[in-house]
Amino acid sequence: MGQPVSSDPISRLSSDVESALAAAIEVAGMDPLGLRPVEPGTGGRGYVVAFDGPAFLCLNTDLKPEQSAARADELARAVLLVESAEVLLDPVALRALAPTAEALAPWEADLTMALDALSRAGEAALHLAEWREDHLRAVASLVALDDAIGRQNRARGAYATFVGATEVLVARQDSLDPTMVQALIAVESAAAAAGLADSLGGVLAASMGSIEEGAAEMMAAHLTPLR
């Protein structure tokens, strides 16, 4: 009888990656620099493997070298897109937004709506940080990336509400308590560091040209024939 399959998603993923690594080494005859499971949304899971050279290998769901150039390109684009998003999502910066509301607590009576919006923005940013830190993010999944974009949109929307609610203070900032001004500046800096100034989806869309170029370079360096 075979070994029982673990019900733990992390354990299953670890086992799948080990099998894919073994398959990649058998095909390439050398150890890879890295391997990424990829779920582009169609066709099931594949694997993109990087080797020194640089050289690349795409494996299909059966852990065989991918023969379809279109499918290999789809896998490469997906992994590059997800990795681009991961660079933009700093969990430390995302987690740093929520605490900035504490410094504005003394003026809660004047900032009720603003603080409510900032609280929602901080909570959404925490949810995005949790997404980024989830061990299952080892899989470059476009479905999961859509989830991240949705979480970031919620954080940005709530922060935009905060900005709108505090705009009235800008006109009279010279008369405000300097401590309050510094607290508001700290919120703005934290939001910028968390990436809430720009839409994650928009930034990724603008980078598609470079992602397509990167995928083409990977296909040109593929270790096995593609057709």
Image (cartoon, rainbow, N blue to C red):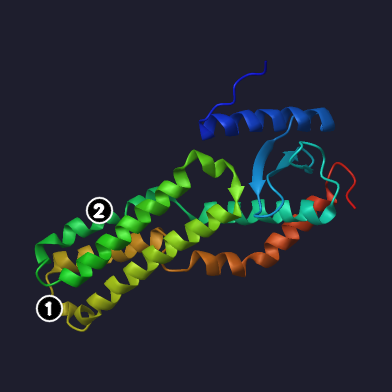
Relative to 147, is 207 above or below?
below
Name of the residue lying farthest toward the top: 1
Q: Residue type at mark 1?
A: Ser
- In terms of image quadrants, where is residue 20? top right
In the picture of the structure, the residue carrying the numbered disc 1 is 175
Identify which residue is drawn at 12% across, 66% down. Answer: 108
Q: Nearer the viewer, residue 117 or 206?
A: 117
Name the front one of labels 2 and 1: 2
Q: Residues within 10 Å of mark 2 (few under 14, many from 20)?
A: some
| Rendered location of residue 8, percent (x, y) | 50, 31
Looking at the rendered structure, the secondary structure element under dot 2 is helix
Looking at the rendered structure, the secondary structure element under dot 1 is helix
| Rendered location of residue 133, percent (x, y) | 45, 43
Q: Nearer the viewer, residue 36 or 146?
A: 146
Identify which residue is drawn at 52% across, 30% down. Answer: 7
Q: Residue type at mark 2?
A: Pro
**Could you tell whether 77 is left or right of 106 in the image?**
right
Task: Examine the rendering and report whether any part of residue 186 can be seen.
Answer: no
Tell me the CA gap for discs 2 and 1: 25 Å
Identify which residue is drawn at 67% across, 37% down. Answer: 34
In the picture of the structure, the residue carrying the numbered disc 2 is 99
Q: Nearer the viewer, residue 146 or 43?
A: 43
Task: Examine the rendering and report whether any part of residue 15 can be seen.
Answer: yes
Q: Residues within 10 Å of mark 1 (few under 14, many from 20)?
A: few
- In terms of image quadrants, where is residue 163? bottom left
| Rendered location of residue 31, percent (x, y) | 75, 29
Identify which residue is drawn at 35% across, 52% down. Answer: 126
Name of the residue lying farthest toward the front: 1
Quarter of the image for the N terminus: give it: top right
